């Protein structure tokens, strides 16, 4: 498979859009014939990244979350970006169970889930400027 | 408002929604805690029969209830986990905190059934 396909969208930082975002990505990658397990992995990772932008990145629901997807051959790359608060210490933020919002009963497992369910996760962030999470997954890697 | 909870004899049964994410977590938690307080519930059972999706926000809800139950000597259990929810329990380590009916190692019958479909 040598196909390339790309999409890009943005939406309000409202919790109702968490479900929308993961379903949109799931439909977009359907052409890659992923297994149900691979789709669920992708949906979980997208949900985590988008939820983080909404809860941690932004305070106002009118702020926009940018979501983009590139399919290249058998690999999909998904990027979730916000122009919100940013992360002061990325390494610490990515530790399991680390959360800055325990009062919201956050489990601190978001980044761990992204890393468990995708092949590669790259985070870049600047305080006061925003955060970008890039995740890659090869489809069909589980077969054989 | 949707309702997820059902007061049973001696425990609170929580019908976990089809998708449990941050969007749903708030109202589920609020409803459960209202009933737990009002009826002094000491046991909470999360039922996943109708659940297709759960992310780390759901983990937060379960750990939170489990902690609260721990303070008063109560307990939290989970039942009817499908393969996906089992995977989420395993990856997060939740299976070490919350007792799951049938365990998390996998239920062969269920897997065979899925294959036959
Ligand atoms: N988009 C973001 N903008 C600002 N901070 C973030 C963002 N994503 C993650 N963080 C920070 O990283 C921490 C860990 O994130 P995560 O592992 O998803 O756990 P949780 O969401 O449960 O807190 C968050 O508590 C927050 O401090
Ligand atoms: Mg998170």
Image (cartoon, rainbow, N blue to C red):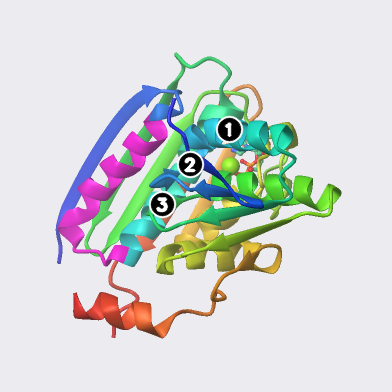
Residue at 69% across / 46% down in the picture?
A: B65
Magenta segment range? Answer: A17-36
Whole-angstrom CA distance, mark 1 to mark 3, is: 20 Å
Report how far apart the C-alphas of labels 2 and 1 lie in the structure. Answer: 16 Å
What's the CA distance linking mark 2 and mark 3?
Answer: 8 Å
Q: Are marks 2 and 1 on the same chain?
A: yes
- Quarter of the rendering occupied by the C terminus of chain B: bottom left
Tell whether label 3 touches label 2 (CB within 8 Å): yes
Q: Could you tell me which quadrant the N terminus of chain B lies in?
A: top left
Q: Position of residue A8 (x, y in %)?
A: 28, 34
Residue placed furthest toward the front: B9
Compare marks 2 and 3 and give the one earlier in the sequence. 2
Task: For mark 3, give the secondary structure.
Answer: strand
- Of helix, strand and loop, which mostly describes the magenta segment? helix
Ligand 1's quadrant:
top right
Specify which label sits upstream in the sequence, 2 or 1.
2
Q: Residues within 10 Å of mark 1 (few under 14, many from 20)?
A: some
Numbered label attached to residue B31: 1
Q: Is residue A97 found left or right of A40 in the rendered image?
A: right
- Residue A88 percent location from the top left of the image: 71, 34
| Residues indicated by labels 2 and 3 sit on the same polypeptide chain | yes
In the rendered view, tell whether residue B85 sits above or below residue B59.
below
Vertical position of residue B8 compared to residue B37: above or below: below
**Label annotation for residue B21:** 2
| Chain of the residue that carries numbered disc 2 in the rendered image | B
């Amino acid at each position: 498979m040598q196909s390339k396909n790309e999409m890009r969208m943005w939406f309000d930082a409202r919790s109702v859009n968490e479900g929308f975002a993961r379903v949109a990505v799931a439909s977009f990658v359907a052409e890659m014939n992923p297994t149900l397990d691979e789709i669920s992995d992708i949906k979980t990772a997208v949900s985590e990244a988008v939820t983080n932008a909404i809860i941690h990145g932004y305070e106002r629901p009118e702020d926009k979350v940018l979501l983009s997807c590139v399919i290249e051959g058998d690999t999909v790359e998904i990027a979730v970006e916000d122009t919100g608060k940013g992360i002061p210490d990325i390494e610490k933020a990515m530790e399991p169970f680390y959360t800055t919002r325990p009062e919201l009963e956050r489990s601190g497992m978001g980044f761990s889930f992204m890393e468990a369910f995708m092949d590669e996760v790259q985070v870049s962030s600047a305080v006061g400027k925003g955060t970008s999470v890039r995740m890659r997954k090869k489809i069909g890697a589980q077969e054989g | 408002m949707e309702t997820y909870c059902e007061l049973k004899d001696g425990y609170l049964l929580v019908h976990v929604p089809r998708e449990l994410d941050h969007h749903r977590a708030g109202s589920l938690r609020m409803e459960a805690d209202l009933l737990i307080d009002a009826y002094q519930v000491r046991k909470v059972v999360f039922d996943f029969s109708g659940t297709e999706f759960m992310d780390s926000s759901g983990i937060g809800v379960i750990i939170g209830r489990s902690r609260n139950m721990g303070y008063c000597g109560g307990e939290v259990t989970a039942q009817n986990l499908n393969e996906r929810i089992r995977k989420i329990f395993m990856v997060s380590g939740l299976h070490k905190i919350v007792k799951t009916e049938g365990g998390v190692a996998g239920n062969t019958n269920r897997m065979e059934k899925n294959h036959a479909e």
